[in-house]
Amino acid sequence: MRSSLIRFQKALRNQGLSGAVVAAPEALSSTNLRYLSGFTGSSGYLVVSPEKAWILTDFRYTEQAKAECSDFEVVIGKSVVETIALICREQRIDVLGWEADKVPYETWQEWNDTIPVVWRPLNRLIETLRMVKSDNEINKIREAARIAGESLMEVLPSLIGRREVDVALDLEIAMRRRGAESLGFPTIVGAGERGALPHAHPTERVIGPGELVTIDFGAQVDGYKSDETITIATGAIPARLREIWDIVAEAQQRGIGAIKPGVSTRDVDSAAREFIAGRGYGEYFGHGTGHGVGLDIHESPFASQDSGQQRTLEVGMTITVEPGIYIPGLGGVRLEDTLVVTEDGSERLTIVPKYFQNIGVVHWSQKSE
């Protein structure tokens, strides 16, 4: 049986819930539904009790649901709300959890009028379970990171003279050729002054010599994503840009060094943020230091100063460390790796070296620092 389903069923028992419904109609695709069932179709609903599980979908996905959801009884082509009500009556499910943050009010109102249960919000229970990854999940992220990293190193030597959009396209093609099912997220490419944009969408701008280029990229393998960012030089750059590159590199290493079981995600953020602030660039680092990576590109845990997002790191959690400095009119630097928390610290899943590289002077290599 799927380990994620077993854990969810145990959590239902622990919370006194006799069942839960997880919905993903076409207008509301749910990552949580895929996590629990393995279903990759565009329309499905799960009903889960501590002992049994059902997936409700339509004719288009009959065979797909049977193949992907072996732990679930597949129910096809019936009224969703009436089927859920029938299952609840037959299985004596009288307290039903639901994703109040995802289901539209009109949909839930129909459920509430038809399904004879007491409703209880799941309060992001599934997202909490997803934070600790299985070995299988980690291996998929590792493979996505390998594909993405090798693809980037193929593309980098031809960076100068190419448009940002061409670089993004070249990188996608290289990842697809290596087996990625898709991009992990839209690739970010920011050259020169556009490096000051943390999420710089690729443009027609031509990458020239003597500037920094930031590339944020990732691949997807079996639903799981990788996330990595580099900032490299295309020749001699102004001294201030090299200064901020060195500061960001040191801040990233301090953030990575803080990762271990029992440490607060806020402390990981502080390790990077306080170094940048101490060097006089605190106002130019305005986002969190990191986030979890899995079926979603941004998922818990989040490393920031937001007390509401604070989590204690556990073995099996993934987290990025991606400090940055962004100076309008000049440019910016961000360096990012995805790591998994281990018993004695962390393991880096992303593979591109983070030492300073100047492709305008030397050819890109995979040598270690």
Image (cartoon, rainbow, N blue to C red):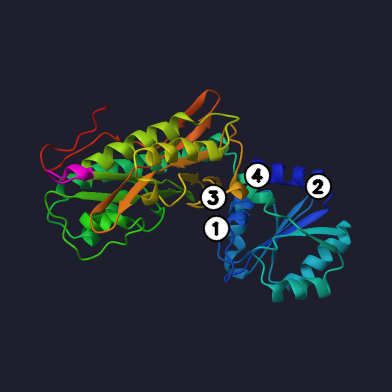
Q: Earlier in the sequence, mark 2 or mark 4?
A: 2
Q: Give the left or right position of residue 304, taking residue 11 as reference.
A: left
**In which quadrant of the rendered view does residue 233 lie?**
top left
Location of residue 108 with respect to 286 vertically, above or below: below
The residue type indicated by label 4 comes to Leu
Tell me how far mark 2 sits from mark 4, CA to CA: 14 Å
Disc 3 versus disc 4: nearer the observer:
3
Q: Earlier in the sequence, mark 3 or mark 2?
A: 2
Q: Mark 3 highlights which residue? A: 299
Quick check: is 240 in the magenta stretch? yes
Q: Mark 2 highlights which residue? A: 15
Pointer 4 local density, CA inside 10 Å: few below 14, some 14–19, many at least 20:
some
The residue type indicated by label 3 comes to Glu
Q: Give the left or right position of residue 248, taking residue 15 as reference.
A: left
Location of residue 185 with respect to 58 vertically, above or below: above
x, y percent for residue 315:
58, 31
Tell me how far mark 3 sits from mark 4, CA to CA: 11 Å
Q: Earlier in the sequence, mark 1 or mark 2?
A: 2
The residue type indicated by label 1 comes to Thr
